[in-house]
């Protein structure tokens, strides 16, 4: 992936992994636009990194996604990269038979990237060099049962990304998947959890992988390999039982 002179839209770029990537890519001389719901987080990111632009959007709203795409293309016609990073995770007790959390997770983690990709892809494909980076999760490859719908959406993002990459073969659009392990962000109340990877260390490792030429289609830091390849290494059942053991 080209690392300089890009115009990059990063959803969920006001916090956590999205902000970490936005800041590093901004430092490398890219025009970065961050999008999310909380204006104060976006403003904070832009204030700390003069030149980063922001747009407020609720990605669960289909009309708001169309509007976001129109605003981005009007204001940043050089847009050539989309990072579908925004996501939510919630614990669910499936036996309760409730759907609110499941539907919100599906709308944010799966429908939104599909909708935003559809809205921006015709433009991206017209750019001489373009990329779409979808953020899945190591949990898409080995589910944490209490986060059932979250893990299902991440498995779906992986599958969708593979198909997208295949359909875009031979075009100017590179399709990448970032597969984080457990990282210290607000996503899972893991900001101070010593079991999670420190965010700066994660971002540094991701940036060094992005800089590889060619960039591997799956961006996988070392900590994510155990779950990503659990099936392949024959350790799936053992790890599944260990991570899902009742506390
Ligand atoms: N941290 C981990 O351990 C981990 C592991 C694997 C994968 N991931 C993935 O990494 C991505 C980034 O997560 P993170 O860890 O950096 O957590 P985070 O700090 O909570 O970031 C999530 C971002 O998504 C945005 N977002 C959520 N719902 C949205 C909506 N409806 N519309 C617009 N923006 C929305 C949030 O902003 P607003 O709330 O302001 O909208 C926030 O900036 C997610 O896709 C997550 O699943 C994280």
Image (cartoon, helix red, strand yellow):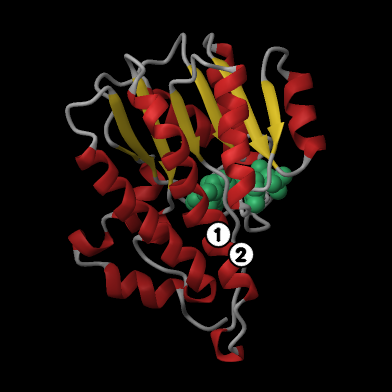
Q: Is mark 1 within 8 Å of ligand 1?
A: yes
Q: Name the residue rendered at 58%, 13% in the picture.
A: 27
Place residue 165 in its image quadrant.
top left
The response on whether ligand 1 sits within 8 Å of label 2 is: yes
Locate residue 40 relative to residue 155 in the image: left or right: right
Taking the image as shown, residue 164 lies to the left or right of residue 140, namely left
Percent x, y for residue 239?
A: 35, 69
- Residue 218, percent from left and from top: 30, 40
Q: Position of residue 79 (x, y in %)?
A: 49, 20
Q: Are marks 2 and 1 in contact (CB under 8 Å)?
A: yes
Does the image show residue 184?
Answer: no
Image quadrant containing the N terminus: top left
The quadrant in which the C terminus is found is: bottom right
Residue shown at 63% from the left, 58% from the top: 188
In this orientation, which residue lies closer to the viewer: 61 or 131?
A: 61
Q: Which residue is mark 2?
A: 104
Q: Secondary structure at mark 1?
A: helix
Q: Position of residue 195 (x, y in %)?
A: 56, 55
Tell me the tag on residue 107: 1
Query: Which residue is at a point 30% across and 21% down the rendered structure image?
Result: 212
> Could you tell me if residue 130 is visible in this image?
yes
Q: Is residue 113 above or below residue 101?
A: above
Give the distance between the C-alpha atoms of the residues marked 2 and 1, in whole angstroms. Answer: 5 Å
In the image, 206 versus 18, the foreground residue is 18
| Number of callouts | 2
Instruction: Name the element at disc 2.
Output: helix
Residue 37 is tagged as none
């Amino acid at each position: 992936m080209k690392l300089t002179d890009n115009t990059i839209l990063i959803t969920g770029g006001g916090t956590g992994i999205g902000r970490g990537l936005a800041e590093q890519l901004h430092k490398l001389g890219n025009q970065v636009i961050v999008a999310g719901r909380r204006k104060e987080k976006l403003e904070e990111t832009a204030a700390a990194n003069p030149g980063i632009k922001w747009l407020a959007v609720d990605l669960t709203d289909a009309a708001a996604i169309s509007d976001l795409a129109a605003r981005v293309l009007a204001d940043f016609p050089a847009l050539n990269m989309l990072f579908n990073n925004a996501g939510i995770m919630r614990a669910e007790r499936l036996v309760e038979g409730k759907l609110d959390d499941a539907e919100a997770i599906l709308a944010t983690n799966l429908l939104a990237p599909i909708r935003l990709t559809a809205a921006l892809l015709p433009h991206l494909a017209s750019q001489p060099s373009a990329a779409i980076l979808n953020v899945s999760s190591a949990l898409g490859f080995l589910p944490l049962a209490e986060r059932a719908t979250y893990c299902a959406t991440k498995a779906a993002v992986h599958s969708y990304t593979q198909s997208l990459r295949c359909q875009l073969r031979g075009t100017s659009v590179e399709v990448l998947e970032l597969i984080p392990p457990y990282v210290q962000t607000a996503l899972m109340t893991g900001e101070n959890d010593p079991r999670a990877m420190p965010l700066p260390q994660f971002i540094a490792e991701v940036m060094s992988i992005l800089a590889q030429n060619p960039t591997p289609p799956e961006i996988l830091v070392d900590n994510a390999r155990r779950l990503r390849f659990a099936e392949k290494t024959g350790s799936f059942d053992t790890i599944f039982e260990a991570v899902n053991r009742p506390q």
